[in-house]
Image: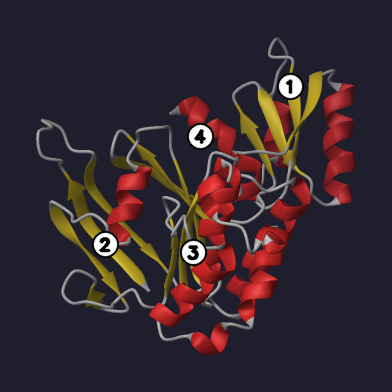
């Protein structure tokens, strides 16, 4: 659905590339997490996809069309990168204006449910100029969601939402992905929320695509091992759900009971257990290694 080929960006006055030779694809209905440290180039990539910045080299095609070859290629996109709205216009009027601008007045009926989703219905008649940063983020998020887009680009969509609001947003985005086949590129430093949502990740480091990998849907039990003992007895148990990572054993919570019983029998009988912890967030490992 979206194809990025050898994309690079060098800003005027800089002697370095903010983004260098990035290539990736996003399929229909796929939710991709964009991760990386501050200044890695994530926002630059998202802004070029949104056409707010032009690439120095490389191409971005959407459904086979170069997005920079003509206007209105991104009509079906919902975009939230920087909070963009009219600060002197009420929240509800901002959404109405956005829909009218895109010729989608028939979707006015979406406004109430969208504002309730982002917890702004009670503030619908207020002007965003006096909002906190989190409320401004939620206003921009509402604008991105209200027009039933086919593709979403979201930068820090969870900011300002309480835990219940975060869970509601995650649920509706996953529903849109599965039922309406909406594609999404989502960047956030809230890694737990990303793991609850994304099926695949791309990791940007120093402007380059450093890694791309499938997500782990379930938390793991981590068994820290006594490395003074012989660990070779664990080899028969290594599988897609059980992996040996340096001095610890990563055991997915979806591992079958029979296998778990056999594994822990070996661990106990050989006194290999040095400690146990729960790993709910696998993405932290990517940052630690980066």
Q: Which residue is mark 2?
A: 51
In this view, 236 is above or below 217: above
Drawn side of residue 250 relative to residue 8, left or right: right
Of pointers 2 and 1, the one earlier in the residue sequence: 2
- The kind of secondary structure element at disc 2 is loop
Q: CA distance from mark 2 to mark 1?
A: 48 Å
Marking on residue 274: none
Residue tagged by mark 1? 224
Q: Residue furthest bottom?
A: 106
Mark 4 and mark 2 in contact? Answer it, CB < 8 Å. Answer: no
In front: mark 3 or mark 1? 3
Neighbour tally class for label 2: few under 14, some 14-19, many 20 plus, Cα within 10 Å: some
| Residue 133: image location, x then y, percent | 55, 42
As measured in the structure, the alpha-carbon distance from the residue carrying label 3 to the one carrying label 2 is: 16 Å
Residue under label 4: 286
User: Which residue appears farthest toward the top when viewing the image?
Assistant: 228
């Amino acid at each position: 659905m979206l194809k990025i080929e050898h994309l690079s960006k060098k800003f005027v006055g800089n002697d370095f590339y903010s983004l260098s030779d990035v290539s990736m694809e996003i399929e229909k209905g796929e939710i991709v997490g964009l991760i990386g440290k501050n200044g890695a180039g994530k926002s630059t990539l998202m802004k070029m996809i949104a056409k707010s910045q032009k690439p120095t080299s490389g191409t971005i095609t959407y459904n086979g069309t170069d997005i920079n070859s003509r206007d209105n290629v991104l009509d079906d996109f919902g975009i939230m990168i920087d909070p963009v709205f009219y600060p002197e216009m009420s929240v509800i009027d901002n959404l109405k204006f956005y829909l009218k601008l895109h010729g989608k007045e028939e979707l006015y009926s979406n406004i109430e449910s969208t504002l309730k989703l982002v917890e702004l219905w009670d503030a619908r008649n207020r002007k965003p100029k006096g909002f906190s940063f989190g409320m401004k983020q939620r206003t921009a998020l509402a604008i991105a969601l209200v027009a039933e887009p086919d593709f979403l680009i979201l930068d820090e969509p969870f900011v300002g939402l309480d835990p219940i609001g975060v869970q509601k947003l995650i649920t509706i985005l996953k529903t849109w992905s599965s039922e309406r086949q909406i594609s999404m590129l989502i960047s956030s430093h809230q890694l737990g929320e990303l793991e609850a949502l994304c099926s695949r990740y791309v990791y940007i480091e120093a402007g380059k695509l450093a890694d791309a990998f499938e997500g782990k849907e379930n938390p793991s039990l981590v068994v820290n091992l006594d490395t003074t003992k012989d660990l070779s007895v664990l080899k028969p148990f290594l599988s897609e759900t059980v992996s040996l990572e340096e001095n610890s054993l990563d055991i997915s919570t979806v591992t079958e009971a029979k296998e778990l019983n056999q594994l822990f029998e070996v661990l106990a009988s050989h006194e290999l257990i040095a400690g146990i912890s729960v790993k709910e967030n696998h993405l932290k490992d990517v940052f630690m290694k980066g």
